[in-house]
Image: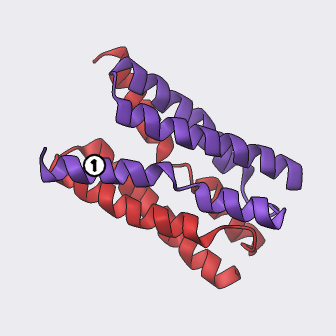
Chain colours: A purple, B red
Amino acid sequence: MTAADILGYAAGALTAFTFLPQVLKTWKEKSAKDVALNMFIIAFINEIMWLVYGIMINNWIIIATNAVMLAMSGIMIFLKLKYK
Amino acid sequence: MTAADILGYAAGALTAFTFLPQVLKTWKEKSAKDVALNMFIIAFINEIMWLVYGIMINNWIIIATNAVMLAMSGIMIFLKLKYK
C-alpha cells in the first residue's frame, strides 16, 4: 500500500462523515431554515450515482462511503422538510 | 470508455456543485444560524486531502472536483462566520 493509497482511504473515510455535524445540529436545534434543501437533494441523487458506480467497478470504499452519505442526506432531507 | 466511466465522470461533475445551493442561499439571505460550521470545516480539510491525493495519483477529475469544492467550502466558512 502506497502513501497515496493511505491518503485516499483516509480521505474517503472522512468524506463519509461530512454531513454528520449538520444532521446532529438540526436534530438538536429543530431548526433548518437556513439550510439549503437543494444541497441535500443534489447530494442524495449524486450518492445514488456513486453507489451504482461503486457496484459497477466493485469498489467497496466507494460503496461504503456513499451508503453512509446517502443515509445522512436522506435524514437531512427529512429533517429539513420537518423543521423548515 | 465504459458505462461505468461515464457514470463516474458524471457523478464527479455533480459532486463539485453540491455546496453551490447553500452558498447561494446564504449569500442571498445573509443568515447562516442553522448551518453547521463543522460540516464545512470537515469538508475543507477533506478536500485538501483529496486534492493532494489527486495530485499524487495525477487524476485530473479528482483535482478539478475538489478544487471547486475547496473554494465553495472556503466561501461557506467565510459566510458562516460573517452571518452566524
Figure quadrant of residue A61: top left
Residue A34 visible in the displayed image = no
In the image: residue B4, left or right of residue A40: left
The outermost residue toward the left is A2
In the image: residue A4, left or right of residue A15: left
Picture coordinates of residue A12, whole percent (x, y):
37, 48
Q: Amino acid at mark 1?
A: Gly
In the image: residue A14, left or right of residue A5: right
Q: Residue at x 46, y 32 (%)?
A: A50
Q: Nearer the viewer, residue B2 or B48?
A: B48
Question: Quarter of the image containing the C terminus of chain A?
Answer: bottom right
Picture coordinates of residue A55, whole percent (x, y):
41, 21
Picture coordinates of residue A15, whole percent (x, y):
45, 51
Question: Quarter of the image containing the N terminus of chain A?
Answer: top left
Residue B59 visible in the displayed image = yes
In the image: residue A53, left or right of residue B27: left
- Crowding at label 1, few (<14), some or many (≥20) Cα neighbours within 10 Å? many
Would you place residue B27 above or below residue B22 in this image? below
Picture coordinates of residue A56, whole percent (x, y):
38, 18
Figure quadrant of residue B13: top left
Figure quadrant of residue B12: top left
Would you place residue B47 above or below residue A40 in this image? below
Count of numbered marks:
1
Q: Secondary structure at mark 1?
A: helix
Q: Residue at x 33, y 24 (%)?
A: B5
Q: Chain of mark 1?
A: A
The outermost residue toward the top is B2
Q: Residue at x 42, y 63 (%)?
A: B70
Would you place residue A54 above or below residue A29 in this image? above
Question: Which residue is identified by label 1?
Answer: A8
Q: Residue at x 55, y 29 (%)?
A: A48
